[in-house]
Amino acid sequence: MRLGFAYRRYRLRFRAPVRTAHGVWTEREGVWVRLCDEAGHAGYGEAAPIPWFGTETIGQTEAVARAIGPKLDANDEESLADAAVEAPCLVNALRSAWHGLQEESRRTTGHASAATQADDPTEFRSVAALLPAGRAALGVITEKAEAGFRVFKWKVGVANVGDELVLLDDVCAALPDGAKLRLDANGAWDRRQAERWLERCAERPIEFVEQPCLAAAAEAPAQRRKIEDTLRGLAEDYPTPIALDESLVVDGDVARWLAEGWRGVFVLKPALLAAPWTAVAKLAAAKASVVFSSALETIVGARAALHLAFTWPGERKALGFGVWPLFAESRCDGPTAAPFLRWSDVKRLDPARAWAALEEKAS
Ligand SMILES: O=C(O)CCC(=O)c1ccccc1C(=O)O
Ligand SMILES: [Mg+2]
C-alpha cells in the first residue's frame, strides 16, 4: 500500500522547567508523524526520544524521517518498521500512526473493531502526582492532596544525600493519611548512597525507589554488569521495592530483566520503545509488577501510551502520567492531571487537532 507520509519536528517550551538528577529541562523536542491512505484517512504518531536515557537523538529521528520522503510503501506494521530501524522512537511513532489509520478507516467504513476491556468508557486508572524536586515538593503535596491524589512521585538525587534525607521527613509528614510516595533518583546514586536512602525508606510509606543507580549506555559492559549486580543486591537487601526505568530503554531490556528473574517493579515508558506492545505482552505473561510512565510526550504520543496502559491485564498500579498541563502551548497537552483518568478521557484526545494547531502556529 502506498501511504502518504508527513512529519513535523516540534520544539515546545515547558510551562515550568523540569528538574531531574540530569539537570534542568526547559523544552521538549520531538517529531510527529502522519500517515494517510488514498481514501483520506489519517493516523498520527509521536517520536519523543530522551537521549540522556539512552534513546536516539532528535537529530537522528529527524534524519531518518527526512529520508523516508513523502510516500511510504507498507503492507503491514513490520514493513513500516523497516523504514526506520535506526530510530526506535520513530518506529514507535510509525506504528502508532498505522494503528490510528486502521482505526480511522474502520470507523468511517462502519467496521468497528472488536471491543476490548479498555473500550469500556467507565474504565479508570489512578494516577500519581509528579512533584518537583527539592523543597518545592512540599507546597505542591498540599495542593495535590486536596485535589484527591494519594500516590506521589518525588524526584530525588538532585541535591546531596544528607540534605534530601532531612527533606524526606518533611515530605512524608506532608503526605495525607494512607498516601504512598515513589522516589525517583534517575540513577544519581552510588551503592553506598542508595543504601543510606533505602535504610531510611524501610519504615516510611515509600512504594518504591526508582532507578537508584545506573550505568550509562556508553559505559563498558563490565561496568554495566557491576551496576546491574548492585541493583539486584539492593533489591535483595532492603524491604522497599526497587523499580527499573532507565535500565529498560532499549527493546530487549524488558525480556532480559525478566529472564534474569527481576521481581521488582518495571517502569515502562511506552514512548521510548520501538515495540512497546511486545514488551507489555512479555510482562503480562510473567505477571510482572508494572507502572506505565510518561516520557513527557505531547497529546499525540500520550494517546498511544495511555491506550496501552489501559489494556494492561495485571495489577493496577497508579499511572505515572500526572504531568499535564506541561507545555506553554496547551493544545499539545495530554489530559490534565487528576487522581483518576477515565478511558473516555483518553479516547477524546484528538491528535489531528493538535497537528492542525502546530501547523497554524508555524504559518
Ligand atoms: O510518568 C512518570 O512517572 C513521570 C515522568 C517522569 O518522571 C519522567 C519524565 C521524563 C523523563 C524521565 C522521567 C522519569 O521517570 O525518570
Ligand atoms: Mg524514572
Image (tube, rainbow, N blue to C red):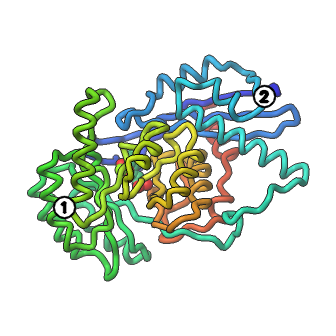
Return the x and y of residue 50 as percentages of the image width and height.
42, 37
**SS state under label 2:** strand
**Does 113 appear above or below 121?**
above
Q: Which label is found at residue 198? A: 1
Query: Sequence-wise, which precedes: disc 2 or disc 1?
Result: 2
Please state which of residues 315 and 359 is positioned toward the viewer in this rendering: 315
Please tell me in which quadrant of the rendered image residue 42 appears: top right
**Does 84 appear above or below 296?**
above
Quadrant where the image shows the N terminus:
top right
Amino acid at the residue labelled 1: Leu
Please state which of residues 207 and 148 is positioned toward the viewer in this rendering: 207
Residue found 25% across the figure and 75% down from its top: 174
Residue that lies at the very extreme toward the left in this rendered image: 162
Q: Left or right: where does residue 235 sit relative to residue 3? A: left
Residue found 12% across the figure and 54% down from its top: 161
The reply to whether callout 2 and callout 1 are in contact (CB within 8 Å) is no
Q: Residues within 10 Å of mark 2 (few under 14, many from 20)?
A: some
Residue position marked by numbered label 2 in the rendering:
3
Alpha carbons under labels 2 and 1: distance apart: 52 Å
Please tell me in which quadrant of the rendered image residue 266 appears: bottom left
Please state which of residues 13 and 170 is positioned toward the viewer in this rendering: 170
